């Protein structure tokens, strides 16, 4: 492939173009439910942030097909090095909205013990979902390192490294793709081209004909896929993972899509996304597109959407109640998980902090004064 022709499977009316992957109804409905779960989680988190109950969130509307399609191609033994918008990949593989909500609140049950920003999930079970990195592109080299380790250990697993169009301007993108190409590491690079890096449009990001075409410089195939077509994304990711597992090396996939919201809750996309363009992409909604496909298979009618979405909202609502009633991490945890053997000076520092906290109480008890 040249990296400039776009691959798709589901036509806008839901008919199939080319070969239908013929997934079992259970699998199709799991993909569908996961897309709606992403939407429900996103909707609730946006409201929680706007009402001041959590500090930050990352809108996900419009990009559900890319993340769920890619996740559907992965095995549980593979590793995901996600971008900050990829929580649908974790949901697809069985992470629960409650586990995720703990991270949104940074409470004591959060995997990262409140040390990460909201949305910066990390899970080891049921899938290896590496901690999301805020610094753009840094996880691309980490992903290549993990893939190289799999090669070294002769494991037949693979790694998915996912990043945005903005990630292609990072140093991590160049060094990661370069080394993966040289070493033929089992890694699939997924560039989610939603056309903006915060407010920076692709026209200011690159002079290349596409993002996928950049693969040529690193000696790997570049594949451009319709990112709003969940089955097409699944298909190209599956093929790239097979290549990786066979020892044939990495692939760069560009999924062309559009985020229907801001970059984050700190961003206002109305300042830079033309209204007309937004309206155009509303019509290309990836959930609706998949519903049309399911309807042609007699698996979908509107009441099914209403039922599943209501269930997803309930599930997320319950997750909020649980997360809000879970206490924050214990103060002692700020010094744990870093050293195998805690150095003496850190231990002393920790002890001094705990003693002070025991004498003065926490910030709330001290009327807002920072106790340490
Ligand atoms: C090294 C680094 N530089 C700058 C930033 C600030 N920043 C956060 S997200 C982002 C844009 C990344 O592009 P992309 O993934 O396409 O953005 P999105 O589509 O999510 O808006 C930037 C520049 C950062 N997090 N890290
Ligand atoms: Mg982007």
Image: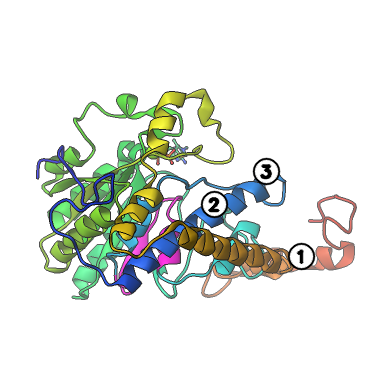
Tell me what residue is drawn at x 15 percent, y 37 percent.
4
Coordinates of residue 231 in the picture (x, y in percent): 26, 57
Instruction: Specify start and end residues of the magenta stretch as a single range.
Output: 75-92
The residue where tag 2 is placed is 42
Indicate the quadrant of ligand 2 in the picture. Answer: top left
**Crowding at label 1, few (<14), some or many (≥20) Cα neighbours within 10 Å?**
few
Q: Quadrant of the N terminus?
A: top left
**Closer to viewer: mark 2 or mark 1:** 2
The residue where tag 1 is placed is 352
Q: Is residue 147 left or right of residue 164?
A: left
Element carrying mark 1: helix
Coordinates of residue 33 in the picture (x, y in percent): 44, 64
Q: Nearer the viewer, residue 229 or 369?
A: 229
Marks 1 and 2: in contact by CB < 8 Å? no
Q: Is residue 4 left or right of residue 298?
A: left
Element carrying mark 2: helix
Q: Mark 2 to mark 1: distance in Å?
A: 41 Å
First in sequence, mark 2 or 1: give its number. Answer: 2
Q: Is residue 134 left or right of residue 204?
A: right
Q: Mark 3 to mark 1: distance in Å?
A: 38 Å
Coordinates of residue 77 in the picture (x, y in percent): 31, 74
Element carrying mark 3: helix
Does the rendering let one see residue 119?
no
The residue where tag 3 is placed is 50
Quarter of the image for residue 86 reads: bottom left
Tell me what residue is drawn at x 29 percent, y 67 percent.
74
């Amino acid at each position: 492939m040249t990296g400039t022709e776009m691959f798709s499977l589901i036509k806008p009316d839901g008919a199939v173009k080319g070969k239908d992957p013929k997934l079992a109804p259970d699998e199709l409905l799991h993909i569908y439910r996961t897309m709606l779960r992403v939407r429900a989680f996103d909707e609730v988190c946006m409201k929680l942030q706007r009402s001041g109950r959590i500090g930050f969130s990352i809108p996900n509307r419009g990009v559900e097909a890319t993340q769920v399609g890619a996740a559907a191609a992965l095995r549980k033994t593979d590793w995901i090095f996600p971008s900050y918008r990829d929580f649908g990949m974790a949901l697809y593989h069985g992470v629960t909205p409650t586990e995720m909500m703990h991270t949104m609140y940074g409470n004591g049950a959060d995997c990262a013990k409140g040390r990460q920003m909201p949305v910066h999930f990390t899970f080891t079970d049921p899938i290896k979902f590496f901690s999301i990195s805020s610094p753009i592109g840094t996880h691309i080299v980490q992903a290549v390192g993990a893939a190289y380790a799999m090669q070294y250990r002769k494991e037949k697993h693979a790694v998915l490294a996912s990043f945005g169009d903005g990630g292609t301007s990072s140093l991590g993108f160049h060094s990661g793709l370069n080394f993966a190409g040289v070493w033929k590491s089992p890694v699939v690079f997924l560039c989610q081209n939603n056309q903006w890096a915060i407010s920076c449009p692709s026209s200011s990001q690159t002079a290349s004909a596409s993002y996928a075409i950049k693969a040529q410089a690193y000696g790997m195939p570049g594949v451009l896929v319709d990112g709003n077509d969940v089955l097409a994304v699944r298909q190209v990711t599956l093929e790239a993972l097979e290549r990786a597992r066979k020892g044939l090396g990495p692939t760069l996939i560009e999924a062309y899509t559009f985020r229907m919201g801001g970059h984050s809750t700190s961003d206002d996309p109305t300042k830079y996304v033309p209204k007309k363009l937004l309206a155009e992409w509303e019509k290309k909604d990836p959930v609706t597109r998949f519903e049309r496909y399911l309807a042609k298979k007699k698996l979908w009618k509107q009441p099914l959407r209403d039922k599943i979405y209501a269930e997803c909202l309930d599930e997320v609502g319950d997750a909020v109640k649980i997360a809000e009633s879970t206490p924050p991490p214990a103060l002692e945890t700020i010094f744990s998980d870093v050293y195998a053997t805690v150095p003496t000076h850190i231990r002393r520092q920790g002890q001094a902090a705990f003693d002070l906290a025991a004498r003065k109480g926490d910030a709330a008890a001290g009327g807002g004064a920072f106790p340490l």
